[in-house]
Amino acid sequence: MDTYDIVVAGNGALGLATARALTLQDPSLRIAVVGPTSRPACASAAAGAMLGCYGEVTAPLLRTGPGRAKHAKGVLAARMWPTWLERLNSELPADAQVSINAGTIVFSNAKSGTIEDENFDAILKAVREEDEPHEMLDPNHVPGLNPADDCRPKHAVFLPREGSVDASRLLRGLTLALSQSPKVTVVDGAVKALDVQGGRVTGVRLEDGRALGAAQVVLAMGVGTQAVLDELPDLARRIPRIFCGGGTSLLLEVPRTALQHVVRTPNRAFACGLHGMPRGGGQLYFGATNILSAKPMLRTSPADMYFLLECVLEQIDQDLCGAQLVAWQAGNRPVTVDACPLIGPTSVEGLWLLTGTYRDGLFLSPLLGQHLARRVCGQSGLIAEDFLPERKPISLYSLKEARAEALKHYVAMGWEHGIRLPKVGWHRSFPRFYQQLLDSLYDALGEEEFVMPPELLAIVESNRAVMVPFFRNYYAEVRKAWA
């Protein structure tokens, strides 16, 4: 059995960034980075990689302590990216280096209801209160936007310090830098289970039967983390459960484009907003959808493909109908049952978690990787440990607030999918229908202590007969674990 000082399970942005930070923290450490080369179900591989701290702000985010803590981490991460990339690039050949495409334009239109206006206003409030550079734009003259007349933007703001990176290029660069280290072994495989003896981790077992020994293990496997935790049920029920936020993205090739920056809407309809950005080689990236489920989405569906392409052509650029298709991509964001991340040590000595980051994993990776590396090496971290893995689920909403927020998302989703109201009066019955639906979901769950975030209601709605008993039993197990 091969033995290392540390095994990092996961080769997405968080796993690679943590492994790199560990090598810089202590070059003598023997580190194994374990993850399948193909990265099936990985969020990072299909990500737009927006460096979006303020672009991700929503009205509910800054109303709660946990929400403000998440935002504060985003502010710190945004400041780290330039110098972090500069150091990474110093170890890479010129043709492998990674650059930031600076600038993000956030625009709002009328395609998804009032939630878009609320979140756009929340973005403006945050940048003004925190003195973040920004410039209001004429919404009818946004470079790269050529929407249909009924999708014209109402407002637009330019955020010069936000932007994006090429996610696939970043993953290749991090992998190359790690593979050049004589103390790092990159293992093509997937961790299946942990070896634990006497309350401390001793290594991992891979799906192909191999075993790796290590006194410290970092689980940064995204949505794959839950299956590993389930092998230790007493530990798993003390950690908020992880679900899958399946997303579809699209790569197009165009001979020329006016799109020079990220363009995006605010978060809306249970998703991170429609967004597009330039990539190298005349390519454009577009996303995203967000389908919450209990199992990973390995391939995109025709429904998601149709929806995303329709949104891109109607709301961003009608002329893209003549572009060449490069690829469809599918990935899965790790979403905890309380929509908050899992960062830090566990009660199993030597076992650390870094996952549950939802839409922010790649963006936060320089900060969280360095924070966890310092903690693993016995030093103080870089951030407050607000989201330790072993905890009761955090309630970001009261039951009343959750019902109201869920209604906004459901109505936005209906409008975004082009619902048609055939007669007078349906504009009132449309939201009333969704109100009855979500009220029945929350009533069926019968939960007031651990209020389910609106995003996760889709999992319950998709198969109520199975998922209502599942969650009722889950919350009962949580109470038992923390009794």
Image (cartoon, rainbow, N blue to C red):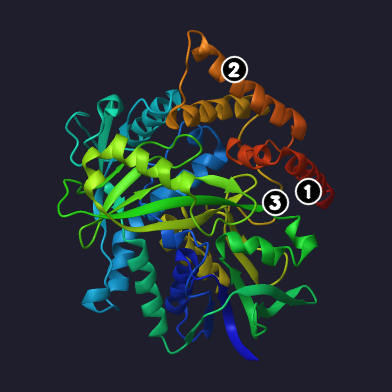
User: How far is disc 1 from disc 2 in space, using C-alphas?
Assistant: 33 Å
Residue at x 30% of width, y 28% of height: 151
Give the number of the mark in front: 1 or 2: 2
Residue at x 74% of width, y 59% of height: 236
Mark 1 secondary-structure assignment: helix
Q: In the picture provided, is 481 more to the left or to the right than 118? A: right
Mark 3 secondary-structure assignment: loop
Amino acid type, label 3: Arg
How far across and down, in percent of the image, does residue 442 sit?
70, 30
* Residue labelled with disc 1: 478
Q: In the picture provided, is 254 more to the left or to the right than 347? A: left
Residue 127 in the image: above or below residue 47: above
Q: Are marks 3 and 1 in contact (CB under 8 Å)?
A: no
The disc label shown at residue 391, or none: 3
* Residue labelled with disc 2: 432
Upstream in sequence: badge 1 or badge 2: 2
Amino acid type, label 2: Arg
Mark 2 secondary-structure assignment: helix
User: How far is disc 2 from disc 3 in space, using C-alphas?
Assistant: 36 Å
Q: Residues within 10 Å of mark 2 (few under 14, many from 20)?
A: few
